[in-house]
Amino acid sequence: MKLLDRYMALQFLKTVAVCAIGVPLLFVVIDLADNIDRFIDQGASKWHVALHYIYQFPYQSLLGSPIAALLGSVFTISAMSRRSEVTAAKAGGVSFYRLGLPMLIVGVVLSFAGLALTEVIAVTTRKSAEVLVQEENRSQSIRQSFVYRGDDGYVYKVRQLDTRAGQMEDVQIERKGTGADFPTMHIAAATARYDSASSRWVLEDGWVRRFFGPDRELSYEFRQIFVRQLDESPDELQARPKEPDEMRYAELGRLIEAVERSGGSTNQLRTSRAFRVAFPFAMVVIIVFGMPLAHSNRRGGAPTSVGIALGTTILFLTLARIAESMGAGGALSPTLAAWLPNAIFLIAGLLLFTRLRT
């Protein structure tokens, strides 16, 4: 059995490895064809465009992982069926369930690798977006009238930031509280100066107001203070704010907490976070679905296998999009929305298994 297990795992990994490279490259070509006019209008160099897609590759790989898993399972089982290897294994007392076990184990390992990849994607997605405009950002030292969302529920409103001088004008800092233990706070300062020695901003000439309840307020004037949470450098404040899909799992969790404290809806953010965990494990589900599907269509050749894989993956991704929209809109809980496509395809795969002669 060890020899057969290694053979099954190796055949599956060969196909998955080829698809894991080929499918993202296909996505890159399609995206390049759609955006080449925009790149030309921006005056982006060939190197910056290439670097943009290098940073995009981890995301495209994760997006294409269900296709790679399905192609791997369909091609492996179909090829073995055409060569009567599945029949020979059954004749040797090996059931189809046991025959596919190495593929499932490899799928679980790859799913955990995909889960780790989501943390990498949070970084590379931001870099892919920034690389095309980095020259433009470097030439700009002034940022006018912007809002910056920081940690612990703090929101910073700035009329003007000068990154070269390390100064801000007309700074307002707000934090929505929940009561006396966590009061709402508002800070207004005429100017702020960045102290590079201590790596912090010093607010100058302003007022602090703390609201502990409907009838409790504490306010005082200051000449100089600093806010511990405002530890971003001038260049970091000048940069484009992070989007939720550019945040790591822990960063997204802090954002959800901040939005909840401010009274906002977090359905979309929670759904996005839940999908980060659920989507990598679609590989295992797709393998369970693909193995009996390929075995029941063993007379078809490579075109049939590709057609089955692409059709199934399109259906899965469409269902995932619908579920994500329902989760963001509040029709489904975020966790249910994230795992619903996996559950549907897993049940369908198990039903297909019950119809096979193992």
Image: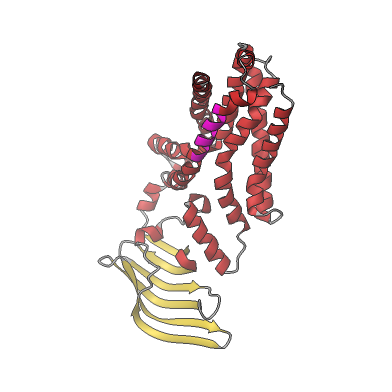
Q: Is residue 247 left or right of residue 100?
A: left
Left or right of residue 112, residue 316 in this image = right
Q: How is the image coloured?
A: secondary structure
Q: 4 above or below 180?
A: above
Nearest the eye: 97 or 117? 97
Q: Name above or below for residue 213 compared with residue 9.
A: below
Residue 313 visible in the picture: yes
Q: Name the quadrant of the C terminus.
A: top right
Q: Residue furthest front?
A: 93
Q: Is residue 240 left or right of residue 352?
A: left
> Closer to the camera, 159 or 240?
240
Q: Residue furthest right?
A: 355
Give the number of callouts.
Answer: 0
Q: Residue at x 42, y 40 (%)?
A: 44
Q: Nearer the viewer, residue 97 or 118?
A: 97
Q: Position of residue 356 (x, y in %)?
A: 72, 23
Relative image position of residue 26 (x, y in whole percent)? 53, 29
The residue sitting at 30% across, 65% down in the picture is: 199
Give the residue at x 50% y 79%: 181
> Is residue 150 at all visible to an observer of this figure?
no
Specify whether residue 108 is painted magenta: yes
Q: Going by the picture, which residue comes out furthest to the top?
A: 83
Magenta segment, prevailing SS (helix, strand or loop)? helix
**Spot occupied by residue 337 in the image (x, y as percentages of width and height):** 66, 49
User: Is residue 111 within the magenta segment?
Assistant: yes
Write down the region rendered in magenta: 102-112
